[in-house]
Amino acid sequence: MNSSIPISDSLRDLLSLVSLTPANIALYGVLAAALPLVFTYTVSSLNDGKPTKDGEPPVPPYWFPFVGHGFALMGGMDKMMSRYRKTDGGPGKPKTLTVFGKKMYLISDPGSILLMWRKSKSVVFEPLLEFTLKQLFGGNDAAARVLNVGSPGVDQTGLEGEMEWMKFVHQMYIRELGPSTPGLENMTNVYLRELNKEIEKLVGKETKEIDLFAWVKKIMFPASGRALYGYKLDLGEEMAYNFWNWDAGFLQLVKFYPDFMIPGVRASRDRVLDALVKWRMEVKDLRDKIDDDVVWEENFGARLIRDRVKLTEQVLAEDDHRGHASIHLSIFWGLEANAIPVACWTVAFALLTPGLFERLKAEVSTAVLPPVEGSSMPSWDVDMLVKLPLLNAVWQESMRLCVSSLSPRVVIEDTEIDGYIYKKGGMVQGMSPIVQLEEEYWGKDVLEFNPDRWLPFPGESASAAGKRIRDYQSKVRPFGGGVSICPGRHFAGQEILATVAVFVTAFEWEMEGKKAPEVNRDYFGAGGLPPKSDVRLKVKRI
């Protein structure tokens, strides 16, 4: 008899579980929602670390059907890769992610990244041009069409017979910005002249207190802009504010953030576009009055820009102001938004790394020339400057620590890279920023600024040093690689090196007790990274 009591109690408990009370309904709802997630994670874990059945890189486990790794990506690609590295027990293993039914491949081995760039016929950047122009630079359909003509991986229906604008522009870059070209030499000299003018306006013999990063940006922005676009483009404080405000929201534009989440970013971009529209309208009638052999002219700027204007007028309607301006904005952004932040960091490390300032000042002083007429600032032997080993080491180490540039590509036919198959239609990300901060490649001091790693070690033979430094260089690729490598990299390098030379020789600095700020790595993938805070210094002209 007593045995019936626990049976009755058990039955009652069971019935209470299956009864449709509000609490049970909520419980069943949670279980119903959780079961697909648990099932998805369990199934996706079965082959963790193994290639897929098609030979693709391993797929890490994920929880959400269809969404795949989308939420993990939203938390930051760098943080996600850090977790995968711990799971793998080391760096360099590629991954296949699924995001809303699409595939994304992440490559973090430096050798595999180089191989990806070499597969330039089947792994290409061109299908991303339309997205980049429209989403980031505010371009329209007509401008995107111009970029799509002849581009591999882009449907050419309706584009047959039209001018391959990108091919001509690529040839222009080689002609005007290649090593030792008159265009590159002249742009660097114009930049230095304009840099000196800005310094003479802003800095005198009296000591002043400055925020270093903001101050360097304020000096470089107009000087760099004039080297490319001449004097007609408005490069004043309002233009600078709008440019940097737009640039600060660049990653959010990539992620399709709405305006209420990034207030003012698109409006700032539109005002920069308006300035470029105004510039084109003011200079368009001057182009044909300038001889073709003039490499820089004060109204129009560099010959590269004149030639781009002329070429673009052949493929866009005269009154398509937005289209013309967006194409110009892409090169203007490439010039300003990457070189200037890197220059800020290089100057900061040069000034604030113990024992470095005097070494660097002594080295760059060997390339000083007398001031040009009308200027109180020194001029420079640029050919000599760019070969100085310590100056280059400071620049290389600054880029390693403070540049975060990804290399997105689209696979347009199945491609093998290091034993894995990358399927047509997938996107590949070359994770160079991960390589730049990997302890296995750089040692225990990977997060420390150490320019001497780029120089021969005491007692190291020249051949051993050369091999080691070339290996380092293969792991720092801030300008990308392959056929889509940054065409302005030579000017950017000369601009940065010249800026550092000026700042360590032309000023007296009060920097005792100061140190370089921390890098803000929340901007992973954004190119030149900002500091977490600026650094306050005192400065005056010598």
Image (spheres, rainbow, N blue to C red):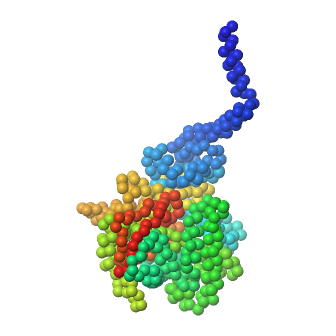
Question: Which residue extends farthest right?
Answer: 20
Q: Nearer the viewer, residue 357 or 161?
A: 357
Identify which residue, 202 or 408, lies in the foreground: 202
The residue shown at (46%, 46%) is: 86
Q: Given the current orientation, which residue lies at the most extreme left position?
A: 459
Image quarter where the C terminus lies is bottom left
Residue name at image x 61 percent, y 38 percent = 38
Indicate the position of residue 533 as horizontal and vertical percent values. Answer: 47, 63
On screen, residue 302 versus residue 452, left or right, reads right
Question: In the rendered picture of this protein, how many numbered marks are placed on residues?
Answer: 0
Residue 317, picture quadrant = bottom right
Image quadrant for the N terminus? top right
Can you see residue 147?
Answer: no
Q: Is residue 467 above or below residue 103?
A: below
Task: Write the residue at 69% across / 72% down.
Answer: 142
In the rendered view, does 5 fall on the left or right side of 382? right
Query: Up-down: is 158 above or below 62?
Result: below
Q: Is residue 104 above or below residue 397?
A: above
Q: Position of residue 48 (x, y in %)?
A: 53, 42
Q: Residue at x 60, y 50 (%)?
A: 71
Q: Nearer the viewer, residue 69 or 345?
A: 345
Can residue 402 be seen here? The reply is: yes
| Foreground of the two, 157 or 334 | 334
* Residue extending furthest toward the top: 1
Point out residue 495 in the picture as x, y percentages from the top left corner.
44, 76
Residue 371 lies in what quarter of the image?
bottom left
